[in-house]
Image (cartoon, grey):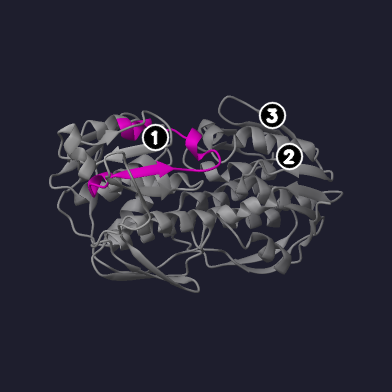
């Protein structure tokens, strides 16, 4: 879909959608609990729908009513919609679409449940590595047919007999590098409490994106599961039981960041549904904006190791500083929905920005205004939303190719954009 955005300042109120990061976690905990849980305030983006579909394949049941979801735990296995292996063994097919969280959260859960499962994905997800799991989980009784990338099958159920192993994931020590995605840590946090023995998650270096692991521990506690942070990483007691709960999903600070930056560029949007005491790392957008505003040079140096999702919109912000701004420790963005470092620099430079790519980040030179022009989202939701915010400070219209990519995380983005005065036209291809 191609959308033309005309330069307009935004003004009005927006209800920020539910945090995708929280929703993934609450859905998984609800699925692992005995009984029925209820989650209110949820936003059904493509990523969240992927997690629900995969949990359904593992045996959970979902009933959607508006922005609320009722979840029946997976104490009964779902054997529908499966393929069979060569020996007739049912294999659960878990399509994660383009959601890295779905993939990396659910692999160890499937292993802990003793499932035979085939994971696959779409877009660039098959290019995102899972070798941490194939290495560590293989040491604990799980057999994989893949070493590093999708598609991947793990054998923990009926197929395990042919390998002469127990099949289910076994407890113990799991050693992870700190500069890999924290999604691997979260996946283990979900799975290890289900095992018979105690386990350790040992970090060999500083854990990047640690706020996401902190968020996981917070959500687990709401469902009766305790994770203990230690000097080596995390201790996880075995034989824990997930308890059903009624919870609400708080607003998403990573989505709010787009409109906070729009305000700095001259708009006046009042943002609702945000928890000021949230543990979401992306709340740091307020600190970076404040520091830039009160810095006489009106620029920033941002270490984005804990806040990688803010990088695209921070690049837009940096274009309107007084001096050069820098983003660093963001090399993991090269394997997101796009190579985000290249994608955001391409998009902004096509509009007249002065953004260069480094090994692990971006250097952003200040400009006065963007030009109009045509840009590509590269199939990346955050690039598409950044282009729309950039258009509020442009001399001419901005045409976004692949604007439908926002459905991955914020399906109502362009509706909200229009609600606060944004002007947009869908361009029909002839």
Q: In which quarter of the image is residue 167?
A: top left
Determine the residue located farthest toward the top in the rendered image: 359
Residue position for label 2? 348
Of the two numbered discs 3 and 2 on the same chain, state the one appearing first in sequence: 2
User: Pointers 2 and 1 in contact (CB under 8 A)?
Assistant: no
Which residue occupies the foreground of this view, 99 or 180?
Answer: 99
Determine the residue located farthest toward the right in the rendered image: 396
Real-space Cα separation, disc 2 to disc 1, in angstroms: 31 Å
Q: Residue at x 43, y 47 (%)?
A: 101
Q: In which quarter of the image is residue 77?
A: bottom left
Real-space Cα separation, disc 3 to disc 2, in angstroms: 10 Å
Q: Can residue 157 be seen in this view?
A: no
In the rendered structure, the answer to whether residue 327 lies left or right of residue 296 reads left
Residue position for label 3? 356
Determine the residue located farthest toward the left in the rendered image: 197
Residue at disc 2, secondary structure: helix
Residue at disc 1, secondary structure: loop
Residue at disc 3, secondary structure: strand
Relative to 101, residue 225 above or below: below
Q: Give the range drawn in magenta.
A: 111-134
User: Pointers 1 and 3 in contact (CB under 8 A)?
Assistant: no
**Whole-percent x and y of residue 350?**
78, 37
Question: Which of the numbered marks, if any, corresponds to residue 130?
Answer: 1
Q: Residue at x 30, y 69 (%)?
A: 245
Which residue occupies the foreground of this view, 223 or 32?
Answer: 32
């Amino acid at each position: 879909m191609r959308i033309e955005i005309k330069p307009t300042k935004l003004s009005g109120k927006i209800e920020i959608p539910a945090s995708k990061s929280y929703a993934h976690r609450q859905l998984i905990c609800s699925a692992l609990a005995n009984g029925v849980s209820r989650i209110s305030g949820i936003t059904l983006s493509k990523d969240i729908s992927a997690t629900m579909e995969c949990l359904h394949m593992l045996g959970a049941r979902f009933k959607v009513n508006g922005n609320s979801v009722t979840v029946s735990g997976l104490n009964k296995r779902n054997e529908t919609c499966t393929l069979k292996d060569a020996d007739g063994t049912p294999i659960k097919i878990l399509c994660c679409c383009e959601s890295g969280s779905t993939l990396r959260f659910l692999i160890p859960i499937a292993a802990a449940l003793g499932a035979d499962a085939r994971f696959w994905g779409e877009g660039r997800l098959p290019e995102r590595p899972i070798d941490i799991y194939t290495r560590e989980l293989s040491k604990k009784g799980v057999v994989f047919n893949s070493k590093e990338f999708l598609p991947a099958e793990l054998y923990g159920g009926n197929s395990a007999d042919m390998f002469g192993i127990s099949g289910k994931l076994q407890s113990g020590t799991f050693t992870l590098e700190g500069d890999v995605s924290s999604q691997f840590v979260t996946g283990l946090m979900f799975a290890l409490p289900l095992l018979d023995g105690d386990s350790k998650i040992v970090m060999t270096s500083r854990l990047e994106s640690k706020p996401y692991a902190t968020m996981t521990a917070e959500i687990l506690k709401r469902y009766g599961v305790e994770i203990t942070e230690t000097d080596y990483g995390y201790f996880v007691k075995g034989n824990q039981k997930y308890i059903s709960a009624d919870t609400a999903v708080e607003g998403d600070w990573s989505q709010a960041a787009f409109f906070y930056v729009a305000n700095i560029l001259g708009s006046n949007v009042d943002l609702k549904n945000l928890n000021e005491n949230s543990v979401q790392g992306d709340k740091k957008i307020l600190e970076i904006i404040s520091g830039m505003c009160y810095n006489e040079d009106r620029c920033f140096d941002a270490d984005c190791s804990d806040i990688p999702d803010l990088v695209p919109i921070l690049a837009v912000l940096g274009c309107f500083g007084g001096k050069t701004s820098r983003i660093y420790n963001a090399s993991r963005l090269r394997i997101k929905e796009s190579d985000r470092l290249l994608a955001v620099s391409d998009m902004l430079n096509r509009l007249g920005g002065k953004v260069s790519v480094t090994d692990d980040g971006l250097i952003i030179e200040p400009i006065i205004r963007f030009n109009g022009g045509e840009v590509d989202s590269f199939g990346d939701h955050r690039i598409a939303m950044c282009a729309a915010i950039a258009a509020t400070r442009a001399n001419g219209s901005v045409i976004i190719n692949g604007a439908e990519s926002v459905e991955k995380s914020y399906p109502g983005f362009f509706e909200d954009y229009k609600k606060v005065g944004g002007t947009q036209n869908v361009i029909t291809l002839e």
